[in-house]
Image: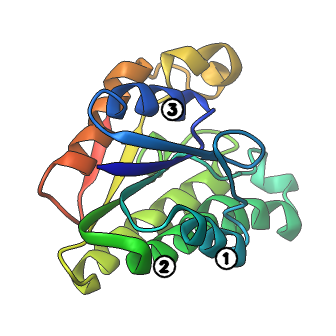
Amino acid sequence: MKIIVIGAAGTIGKAVVERLGQRHDIIAAGRSSGQQQVAIEDYASVQALFARTGAVDGVVVAAGGLHLGSFAEMTPEQFHVGLHGKLMGQVHVALAAQHALNDGGSITLTSGIDAYHAIRHGANAMTVNLGLEGLVAGAALDLRRGLRINLVAPTVLTESVPLYGHLFPGFESADGKRVALAYERSVDGPETGKVYRVY
């Protein structure tokens, strides 16, 4: 199958490319890296990506900006970072992908453990990640042609602990290879409307 991985240069993206690339043709995409460039915050950019790649069998999104900071000091503009970046960015991909995927194709989005287990400075992330869960649950009922949509919600990656571990005190990390299995399950499995929690 031909699978687009958006955010392929990131920590999760690299692990997903390595795992899915064992059996599928991968199109690596990113804002400024990969075979294809795309800005998921811009719906026209997402549409242009699918126009360039032609029909594909799946798309994985492991990208999207968030704002991590104290809610007591947060501005609407800062809160909008996650809404515009990670939430609407992945909405844009899902909306465009349903018209670009082959029959039976899959859409796999990414949230995080902080959708269910609050962390300090995580109000923006929690809002966005729970919103993505609602998107997947609702969209799964309406997609046609056998299309599927799922969500992977990983804990902090072991590879990312040096950068983000201080935000997740007492959380058990998971290495990228383990997290990538959930994406494989979404792409190659039969389920839709599911949240695969890796923690």
Left or right of residue 195, residue 38 in this image = right
Looking at the image, tell me whether mark 1 or mark 2 is earlier in sequence order.
1
Q: Pick whichever, 162 or 123, lies toward us.
A: 162
Measured from the top left, where is residue 197 in percent x and y? 30, 41
Evaluate if marks 1 and 2 touch, with contact meaning CB atoms under 8 Å apart: yes
Q: Position of residue 126 (x, y in %)?
A: 55, 54
Dot 3 or dot 2: first in sequence order is 3
Task: Tell whether label 2 touches label 3 (CB within 8 Å).
Answer: no
Residue located beneath label 2 in the image: 95
Residue 173 appears in view: no
- In the image, what residue type sits under mark 2? Leu
Question: Is residue 80 shown left or right of residue 26?
Answer: right
- Where is residue 124 shown, x and y percent of the image? 66, 57
Looking at the figure, which quarter contains the C terminus? top left
Q: Secondary structure at mark 2?
A: helix
Circle 3: residue type: Ile
Q: Could you tell which of marks 3 and 1 lies nearer the N-terminus?
A: 3
On screen, 75 above or below 166? Answer: below
Please tell me whether mark 3 or mark 1 is closer to you in this view. Answer: 1
Residue situated in front as seen by the camera: 93 or 172: 93
Estimate how packed mark 2 is, as few (under 14), some (14 to 19) or many (20 or more) residues with alpha carbons within 10 Å.
some
In the rendered image, which residue does mark 3 sit on?
Answer: 12
